[in-house]
Image (spheres, coloured by chain):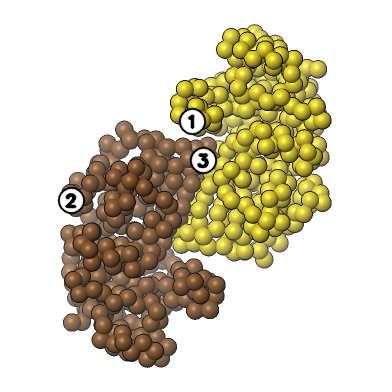
Chain colours: A yellow, B brown
C-alpha cells in the first residue's frame, strides 16, 4: 500500500505492506488531514520515524473482537494505551506511560491506505457528518478538550491567540460555553472564517487595548510572541491554556507568571464523543477551514503546501 | 534616619528623613531579613529605586486610626492596596492593580530605622515568637501560601527543588499537610537543616531515580535547570508551583508542558496569620536558617554576604 513516511530525515511516498495486527482493527483510510504536528515532525519534533498523520476517517475492514464495527465509517482516538494500567482501566489512554500515538509515537499513522488501531479507539461517524467534516474530529476534540481542564461559564471572558485552524476550532467550540470569546490573529481573512458565531475578532495590532482584561487565554499560535502576548492579556490569577506543541525552546519571563500568579495549563488531546456531537448537531463549521484537497499520491507536495503561511487545513483523499 | 537604599544603580546606606504618613502606621523596625528578591532588585529586578527590604519585625510608634496598635510588636503584609477595588474590599490587596509593595514596588522598605504601612497590614506578634523568628513570617507565609493555591492531602507525593531558605520553608510547612515530601538540593549540609520533620532529603545528583513520580513539584531554586528538573520529576497531569522570582528570561521546552498536560501555578505572597500560627505553635523551625546577623550600618556588607552561595538568611539588627 502507499504511505506518506518520514524516515532518515526524509519525507517520501513509499510502498509498504498493508498492516495486519490481530488484536487491532484494520481501517481503510478514506481521507486524512494534515496537522501542524505533522509539519513539526518533519522538522524533527517527537523524533518520529514512520507513516505520519493522525487525523482521518476510514472504513473498518477487519475487527476480530468487534465484528459489529466491520464496514462502519469511523474516526479514531490517536492514543493507544497498554489496556492494563490505572489510566487505561479508567478508559483514558491519553497519558498511559506505555502508549503509542498514531503517526506521532511508535505507531504508523493515517496518511496511508490502511492503518490499525485498537478497536476501543474507534468511534462510528453519524451519517450526517461528511467525510471531510469527520477528519476534523481529532483537532476539534483537542480544542473542546479545554473544557475538561478549565471551568468556562457564560461570563468567562476569554481570548484565543492564533487565527489558524486550532485557534479557529477553539474559538468556535468555546463560544458554545462562554458569551465573551475573543479571537486574536494577524490575518483579517482568517479571523473572518469564524463567521457569525458570537466571537469578537481582533487584529493582533489592536490587541494591546485588551491588556489585563481576560480570566482565560488560550495560546494556539505556537509562537513565543503568542505566549508573551497571553501574559499581557491575562488578569492577575488568570489561566493560560497552552495548546500548541511547537518544537524547540522558547524564552519566557517566568517571574511574570510568579508575580501575577498565573496558572498555565498544558492541553493536548480531547475526547472524541463530544466533538462528534458538536459536528452532528451542526454547532461548529469546519469546511470553511479547508484550503486544499489533494490525493495521497501528492502527499509530499501537500505537506509543502501545508507548511506555507496562510494555508489552513490540507485534506488528503486516500481511497473511496 | 538610616536606610539601606538602591538608587541610580547603587546600593548605599543613606541618611533620610523619618517617614510620616498620617493615613498609615509608623513602625520602628527592630530586625529585618534579607531576601533573594532584595539581591535581585540590586541586579535590576522590578526596576525599584528606594529603601529595600520587606521582611521585618517592629514596634508601632504611631497609628492614628488604630491606637490599640501603638507600642505593639508587629509584622506586616507587604502589599498595600488602594482599599477600594474589588480585591481590596475582599481584604486581599495582593493583586490590587494600584498596589505598592514594601521595598519592591513604589514604597520604601524595611532595611531602615522606620517604615510606614497601612494599619490593616499589621499583625501583632505573639509573645512566644522571638524577634528573629518573626522576621521569617513573610517568607513562611509565601511558602505556606502554596496551600491556598493547590490541594495537598496526606497522600500527595510532592517534591521541593532548592535547598535554600525558601525551599526549606516550603518543605517544613508542606510536610504538615503531606506525609510524602521530598526536598531536593545540591548541598548535603543545607538539606540537613530541615532536621527530623518527616521530609526525605535527596541530593540533586540522585534525583533522576525519582523521575515521573510526583503529583506536585515546587520550584524554589530560581534556576532554569530547576524548572527543567521539575518537568522531569512530574507525573503526567502533575502540577508545578513556581515560587522564585528570578530576573531575566529563561528557556523552556513548552511542548513538554503540553504533551504531559502539566499545570504550572505561579505563587507569590501568602497570608500572614497562618504563618504566625505555625511559629506560635512551634511547628516550623527557622532559627537554624540564620547564617549571619549584622547591624543595619553594615547593610551594604550584609547584602554582599547574602549574595554568596551557601549563605542562608542574613538578619539585620536595626534598633532595640
A304 sits to left or right of B84: right
Task: Name the residue that disc number 1 marks.
Answer: A87
Task: Name the residue that disc number 3 marks.
Answer: B261
Q: Position of residue A109 (x, y in %)?
A: 63, 22
A269 sits to left or right of A154: left
Task: Name the residue that disc number 2 marks.
Answer: B195
- Residue placed at 77% from the left, 35% from the top? A280
Which numbered circle lies on residue B233? Answer: none
Q: CA distance from mark 1 to mark 2?
A: 37 Å
Q: Position of residue A117 (x, y in %)?
A: 61, 19
Vertically, is A166 above or below B132? above
- Judging depth in this view, the residue of A102 and B187 nearest the camera is A102
Return the chain for callout 2. Answer: B
Label 1 environment density (alpha carbons within 10 Å; few <14, some 14–19, many ≥20): some
Disc nearest the viewer among 1 and 2: 1
**Residue A294 image-quadrant placement:** top right
Q: Position of residue B238 (x, y in %)?
A: 44, 42
Q: Quadrant of the N terminus of chain B?
A: bottom left
**Residue A16 image-quadrant placement:** top right
**Residue A301 image-quadrant placement:** top right
Q: Position of residue A38 (x, y in %)?
A: 64, 30
- In what element is the residue under mark 2? loop
Disc nearest the viewer among 1 and 3: 1
A127 sits to left or right of A86: right
Return the chain for callout 3. Answer: B
Amino acid at each position: 500500500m502507499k504511505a506518506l513516511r518520514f524516515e532518515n530525515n526524509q519525507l517520501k511516498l513509499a510502498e509498504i505492506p498493508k498492516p495486519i495486527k490481530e488484536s487491532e482493527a484494520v481501517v481503510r483510510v478514506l481521507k486524512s488531514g494534515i496537522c501542524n504536528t505533522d509539519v513539526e515532525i518533519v522538522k524533527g519534533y517527537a523524533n518520529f520515524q514512520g507513516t505520519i498523520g493522525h487525523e482521518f476517517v476510514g472504513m473498518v475492514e477487519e475487527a476480530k473482537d468487534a465484528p459489529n464495527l466491520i464496514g462502519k465509517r469511523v474516526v479514531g482516538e490517536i492514543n493507544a494505551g497498554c489496556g492494563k494500567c490505572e489510566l487505561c482501566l479508567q478508559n483514558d489512554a491519553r497519558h498511559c506511560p506505555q502508549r503509542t500515538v498514531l503517526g506521532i509515537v511508535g505507531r504508523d499513522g493515517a496518511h496511508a491506505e490502511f492503518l490499525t488501531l485498537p478497536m476501543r479507539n474507534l468511534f462510528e461517524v453519524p451519517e450526517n457528518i461528511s467525510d471531510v467534516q469527520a477528519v476534523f474530529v481529532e483537532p476539534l476534540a483537542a480544542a473542546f478538550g479545554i473544557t475538561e481542564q478549565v471551568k468556562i461559564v457564560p461570563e468567562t471572558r476569554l481570548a484565543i491567540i492564533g487565527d489558524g485552524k486550532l485557534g479557529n476550532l477553539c474559538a468556535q467550540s468555546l463560544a458554545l460555553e462562554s458569551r465573551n470569546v475573543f479571537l486574536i490573529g494577524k490575518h483579517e481573512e482568517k479571523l473572518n472564517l469564524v463567521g457569525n458565531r458570537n466571537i469578537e475578532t481582533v487584529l493582533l495590532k489592536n490587541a494591546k487595548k485588551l491588556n489585563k482584561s481576560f480570566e482565560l487565554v488560550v495560546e494556539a499560535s505556537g509562537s513565543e510572541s503568542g505566549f508573551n502576548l497571553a501574559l499581557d492579556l491575562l488578569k492577575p490569577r488568570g489561566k493560560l491554556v497552552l495548546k500548541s506543541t511547537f518544537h524547540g525552546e522558547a524564552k519566557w519571563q517566568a517571574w511574570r507568571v510568579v508575580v501575577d500568579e498565573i496558572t498555565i495549563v498544558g492541553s493536548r488531546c480531547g475526547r472524541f464523543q463530544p466533538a462528534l456531537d458538536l459536528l452532528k448537531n451542526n454547532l461548529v463549521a469546519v469546511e470553511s477551514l479547508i484550503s486544499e484537497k489533494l490525493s495521497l499520491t501528492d502527499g509530499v507536495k501537500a505537506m509543502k503546501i501545508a507548511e506555507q503561511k496562510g494555508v489552513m487545513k490540507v485534506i488528503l483523499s486516500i481511497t473511496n
